[in-house]
Amino acid sequence: MSDPAITLYRLQACPFCERVVRKLRKHDLAYRSRFIEPMHSERDVVKRLSGKRTVPAIVDENTGVTMSESANIVEYLDRTYGEGAEGGEREVA
């Protein structure tokens, strides 16, 4: 089986990150977690992806979307994979 199409960049025990995790699980979406550096100034991998050093951030290879900010991500996941949404990977690894 191939790697999940969605990668979540997150911090340990981050409430905003957990909000996104709950939404991914609600929609039965397989995802890969990448835990990043706690020091804001050392989050270069996230900065390269989303243009910001904030987490959570996701990369969705299904749609080509990269975004940060938990509220935006949750809205995107509902719109893209929620009830009545078209397409999307629903298989969980």
Image (cartoon, rainbow, N blue to C red):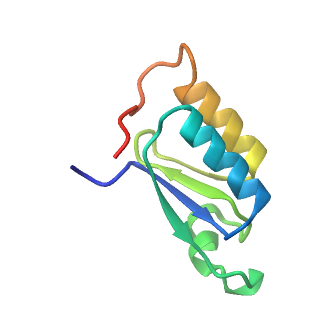
Rendering coords of residue 3 (x, y %): 31, 55
Rendering coords of residue 84 (x, y %): 54, 13
Q: Residue at x 74, y 49 (%)?
A: 70
Rendering coords of residue 35 (x, y %): 57, 72
Q: Residue at x 63, y 51 (%)?
A: 67
Q: How many marks?
A: 0
Rendering coords of residue 17 (x, y %): 70, 57
Residue 30 lies left or right of residue 57; in this view the side is left
Residue 71 lies left or right of residue 79; in this view the side is right
Q: Residue at x 21, y 49 (%)?
A: 1
Nearest to the observer: residue 35 or residue 61: 35
Quadrant housing residue 90 = top left
- Does 65 appear above or below 48? above
Most distant residue in the left direction: 1
Nearest to the observer: residue 18 or residue 85: 18
- Does 84 appear above or below 34? above
- Does 46 appear above or below 74? below
Q: Residue at x 72, y 67 (%)?
A: 13
- Does 27 appear above or below 60? above
Quadrant housing residue 46 = bottom right
